[in-house]
Each structure stands twice: as C-alpha cells, then as structure tokens.
Amino acid sequence: MYAPLLSRDVWDEEEDDIHYPSYTVGDDGDDDEEVLYWSLDHNKKMECSKLLEGGEKMYDDPDQTEERVKYPRSVFFIIGTEFCERFSYYGMKAILTLYLHNELKFSEDSSTVIYHVWSMLCYFTPILGAIIADTLLGRFRTIFYISVLYVFGNAVLSLSAVPPVFPDLGPKIAVSLTGLFLIALGTGGIKPCVSAFGGDQFVLPKQERQLTQFFSIFYFSINAGSLLSTYITPILRDNVHCYGDDCYCLAFGIPAILMVVALSIFVAGNIARLYRKVAPQGSILADVCRCIWHALRQKCKTKENKEHWLDHASDKFDKSLISDVKVVLKILLLYIPLPFFWALFDQQGSRWTFQATRMDGQIGSWTVKPDQMQVVNPFLILLLIPIFDTLVYPVLARCNLLKRQLPRMFTGGVLAGIAFLVSGIVELKLEETYPIALENGETRLALINTLPCNIRLNMSWEEKEVNLTHLEQVVYKSINIHGQNATLNVTLDLEDETCGDVIHVMPDYEIFVTEKQAQTVLITIDTTIVQMVPVDPPDEYLKPSSGLPRLRMLYNLGVIPFNSTVLLKGKFDTPFEFKIKEKPQGYISGTGFEDVDPDNYEVYLPTSDGGHEKSPYKIDVKLGGVYNFLVQKSLDEAHTNQTTVKNFQITPPNSVHMLWLIPQYFIITVSEIMFSITGLEFSFTQAPISMKSVLQAAWLLTVSFGNLIVVIIAEAKFFKSQAMEFFLFAILMFIDMILFAMIAYRYKYIDELAVENNDKTEESEKGKCFDKREMRSRPGLL
C-alpha cells in the first residue's frame, strides 16, 4: 500500500502554460515577518499554503476571488485505471510464493528470496519511470507504453502456468521469471506517474480541496483493489482445478485481464480528449543529484570553508535549490532506518503465508486459504484509518501523547517488532506439531497389515514383538541404519490357524530402505503367498506447503484393468482421480501423492466394464494432513467379495487454527498506519514544495532496500528454526528504532524553526532600537 505525494506541478488555466513553482521570500509591507510565495512568473505572486504552529494549514479561499473551475472528469478514468491495476498487482502477488514453491519447486527459502528480489525491483523501478516521464515522454505516454509492457508480463506469467504449454520445469521457470521481471518493470514504471498524472488534472490553487479529495479516493481505490483481489485470487487458485491441479493459470489470468481493462480505461480517457497533459520539464531528482555531486567535487578541490558543504555548489546552482536540498538531506537522514520496517512488513506475502500453510483454516464448512490471510491487512487498513483519525489520535493528543509525526513513526516501528515477536511465539507452538525431519543415517518405516487375520512381527531394529490386527498400522518414525541403503529383517507369524486365502508364509522377509526416506510396506497376499511389498513411490511425510491435505492411494485390486481410476467425490463438482498404473510390483502398488481439498469424500470404485460404483466407505481428510488410503480386493474370497477401503494417517493434520494469525496482522496493520502513512505525511509537510517528488522516490527506495534485507537474512540462513528468524527480525527492528529515535531527537520541525527565526528577528530588532537610543543620548559617539 502506498499513499502518493502531491505533484510539484502548478499551471495556469490555459492548458499549455506550464510553470514549476519554487520558494521565494518577500517582504510583506510594514510587517517584519517574511512571507513564503510560489513564484509563478516575474509579474505575479500567489501565496501558497503555509504551515503554522501546530502543523495546521491555511488556504486562501479561491472560490471567493476566482471563477469556479469544473471538476475534471478525467480523474474517474484514472481512478478506474488504478483500481484495476492494483487488483492485478496484489492478486498476482498474493499467490506468488505458493506458485514458486508448489509449481516451480523452489524451497521455502528460495521462494522467499525470489519473492523479495521481485518486490525490490517493483519498488526500485519507479525511479526509472519518474525519470522517463519527467525528461523524455511525459506522464501520459510513460503510463501508456509501460502499461503495454505490464500487460505483456502478465500474459507471459499466465501462459507459463499452463502445464501443457510448458510441461518441462526448466523452460517453465525461465518463462515465469521473465514474466515477473516484466511485471516489475511495468508496475514500478507507472507507480510514480499515475498519482501525479491525476494531480495534473486539477488547476491549483483553485482546486486544492478537490485535489485532496481525489487523493483520498485514489488511496481508497488502491486498498479496495487489494482487498478484493487478495480474497478472490486464492479462491481461483484452489477451488478451480485445471489439468488435475491448482489452477494457477486462471489465478494469474484474471489479474492479467484486469490489467488489460486498466489499460483500456486509461486509453478511453484519452480518446474522449479529457486528459490535461503536462509536457516533460526535466527531472528535479536529476537536478538534486547533480547539485550534490558538484558540491562534493568542489569541496574536494578547494580548502575554502563554508557554512555548509552544499554551499560549494553555489557557483553553478541556484541558492533556492541548494537551500531545498539541505532540507531534503535532513529528512533523508531520518530515512536511513526505515528499510527495516519494510523488511518486516513485506513478509506478509512470504514467511507469514508459509506459516499459514501449516495451520488449520477450517471455519465450519468454509476453508480459509493460506494466501487469503493477506486480505486481513487491507481490510483492517480501510477499517482503522478513520478510527485513528477521529478517535485514537485525538484521545492521545488530549493525553499529550504522540502529537508529532516522528514519535508516531517510532511507535509504529516498535509495534512492527512486537508483531514479529507474536509471529515467533505462534511459530514455536506450530513447531510442536511438525514431523521430525530425517537426518543422515535415519529412515522411517510404516507396516500395514492387510491380511484378514492377526499377525505377530519380530524385527531386527525392535526388541519387542509387535502384534497387528486386521488393517492396523505400526509406524517407526526413526530407524538408525548404517550407510545410505540398508536391509531390515522381519519375521512374521500368523496368530490364527486360518487366514483367508493364505497358504504359505515365508520364514523371513527383507525390506530394503534408504536413509532420509519414509517407506510404507503392505503386508498382503500375492495369489496365496504372504508378501511384504514396499509401496512405490516412498511416503511424503512433511506437511504440504500448500496447506491442503495430501493423499495417495495404495491398491491391491487383482484383475482390475490398468489405467482404471478410483474417484473421490466431495462437495465440489470435479472428483479427484487416482489411476491404477502398471508397475514392477504388478497389481500391488501405490499412486503418487496429490493435494486435495479438505472434505469427507465418497469413494467410487472401478468395475470390470470400465464404469464406477459407489462403495460404502468414506475418507475424511483435513488441512495439513498426509494420508495413504488403501483400496484392496477381498483376501478371503470364501467368505466375502467386498473391496476394502481404509484411510491411514502419515502426518497429523494442522491443529493450530489460522485465526491465531489475526493478532500479528492486527499489530502490523496498526504499525503501518502509524509508521507508513504518518511517514508520508511527515515527508509531505516537511519537504520544500519542489522536493516532494524527490522524497517520494526516496520513500519507495526504502521499501526496495527493505526487501533486500530479507533476501540477505534468508540467504544467510542463521537458524534452522523459523521462530528464531522471526525473533531475530524483531530484535533488529527494536535496535533500528533506537537508532531512529536518536536521529529524530535532533530533528527540528519547520514550525519550530520558524519560531526560532522569529525569536532571533525580535532580538535583533530590540538590539537595533537600543543602539539607536544610545547613540541619540550620546551624540559624541556619532
């Protein structure tokens, strides 16, 4: 989220008469007070809005002295464009980390790094967009051309998510990253231009109130687009199935279509000839950089001492520009600690989303998607901003607390650290539910008795004898082995005299295992001989990164034709299919794992004629759980021909509810209001009018550098525990805010400087009066 700063542009009523204001100081008649003006031309002066004590603004009422100017209809096209673009951006961003991890098969750490590198580019490229608009193309053409690039990037990303188009992972990754790069150029390139182009549509100062109203609606459209898209796109991803999996191509395709709509709305405003277009007049950012560079060069060349090192640029640059740059540098000093806030805030789309995948999102019949939790932030933003403006800040002001912007920003930063303390505590609770990862020299084994009788097992790694009843499972979560591969010995005895169709039991069985691998072994019958069959592929015992249940079928269905399917039908229209394939084990094997929706599924079994029949069994799966469900023919044909279905749990489902994330989202949102929105207000009110675009560029760079911090810490991998990483970010944020407080303590607001200047002026005048009186009384001194 961002709130745009006002443009520096001011123009006369005639469309092509463009002027750029600067500060000048004039003498207001007999009054000794200096008055601040916007200089529009050499023959005309207009008083600008002036900050008084308390930070209030006073404006001349243009409606009293000037002819009323019509409200520009063009801004509605601009607001519509912004809404659709923000829907596209935040909708795609909401599901990006899960796409990187689940579809492109990056690890959680690598997905986090790619996500934040991309976010860093999104907030760095606005500098390029602003320079292009100010020096070459103007805002309208910059928005148009870069939006075309933006649309193309969305289309490329959507196409990369279509499995038949890119079946191989390598090309799919390359095309996906290309699409993300183009989107970063697109969203960043138009980010500084759209809000400023909206400001261009108003005649100042006649429509200053309307301009303020426009930016309020503009900011609302940003959050509304974010709110809707963050809620909708995870539903499209998860509830719609494309090519037998999550429909990322649709979830990316809808934002791509919205970006096409955004471009169409923007072009429609131009076709209607509604836009007021300002020709490029040069970049103030470039002027500032040249001024600073020249001052540094001159300082190194000369030994002359000046009051401020920037004064060395006075031989080439105007004094008013140098004075404005001095003010900007004081504000930029306060910007140094700001990136750490964004390092924490932007992890809502990465680390916090992965955290949500390991939690239970079931609320009655409704399931909250992990990436859907990001909707909490824009929802709370829209809810809390008016509450803070009308209630919280006034109450705090009555208690003489947080009346100034910098203390509010400090409080917001501390709250961000507290939010990560809360997330770390939640993660510690979650870690208690995680399956223990296998280390070198360890393996995991599950044995399932599918025989129609009870059995006794004696195993080489276990001292005690194990008894298993019919369709009972025993799981060994960690078995120590020597080397990468090993052979485990098992002896089996039948407890009953008869055991269905069993005729022969071998005295000893060997199970081949591999380190750091989980294996399920079916104790079953192949014709009339008891067999121990390791299921291929091995078990996936870690919690699914998607947050959904993960399920696969174990089967022993005898003469059912290969490529027959078992169907699971739940509340959605499309059933999940598990296909029986020919494998080296023959008819006794297993399918691959598949992520399914949490539900209580009815099981439809294949028939010999290629159809399906409903079985009396149901399978219940929950979020985060990993399951094997067994479908097996009767092993006691003398008594029954009924096929058996049984669900076995590999990994327990998520037990900590996703709503426990609400506190950290609430705290980080309050932090955003007090830190980010207040920071933008501080920058706007403290900056000279000609430098507002410079500070907007610097503000966006702090977001970019914040994402870079996440990349560095994620790549460093200081801790194996995610909770410890959250605590590290919290501690670093607290240290960062101490640094911010030390810098802010020395900062003087412009109204404080004005009071000091007035006091010095009064003292100077008193001194002059005393000198004159003294000289009149002592004429000999004249």
Image (cartoon, helix red, strand yellow):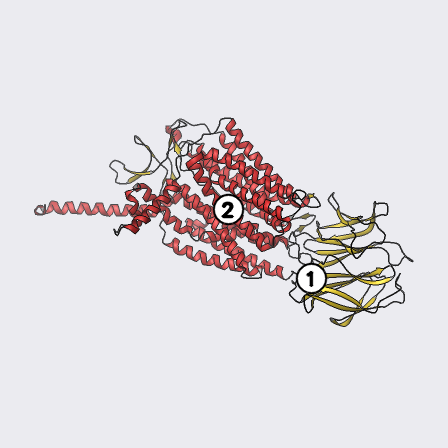
Can residue 342 be seen from the camera position used here?
A: no
Residue reaching furthest to the left: 780
Is residue 389 found left or right of 776 in the rendered image? right
Give how far across and how far down residue 452 sits, in percent.
Answer: 85, 61
427 over 761 or under it: above or below:
below
Using a 10 Å C-alpha cutoff, classify the residue at mark 1 as few (fewer than 14 neighbours), some (14 to 19) or many (20 or more): many
Q: Is 231 on the left-hand or right-hand side of 288?
A: right
Q: Residue 423: give x, y in percent of width and height.
A: 56, 56
What residue did someone put label 2 on? 121
**What residue type is disc 1 on?**
Gln
Q: Nearer the viewer, residue 631 or 63?
A: 631
Mark 2 vs mark 1: which is more N-terminal? 2
Residue annotated with mark 1 = 517
Quadrant assignment, res 6: top left
Q: Which amino acid type is marked by label 2?
A: Leu
Q: State whether residue 533 appears in this view.
A: yes
Q: Is residue 685 left or right of residue 158?
A: left
Considering every residue shown, the one lying at the far right of the view is: 638
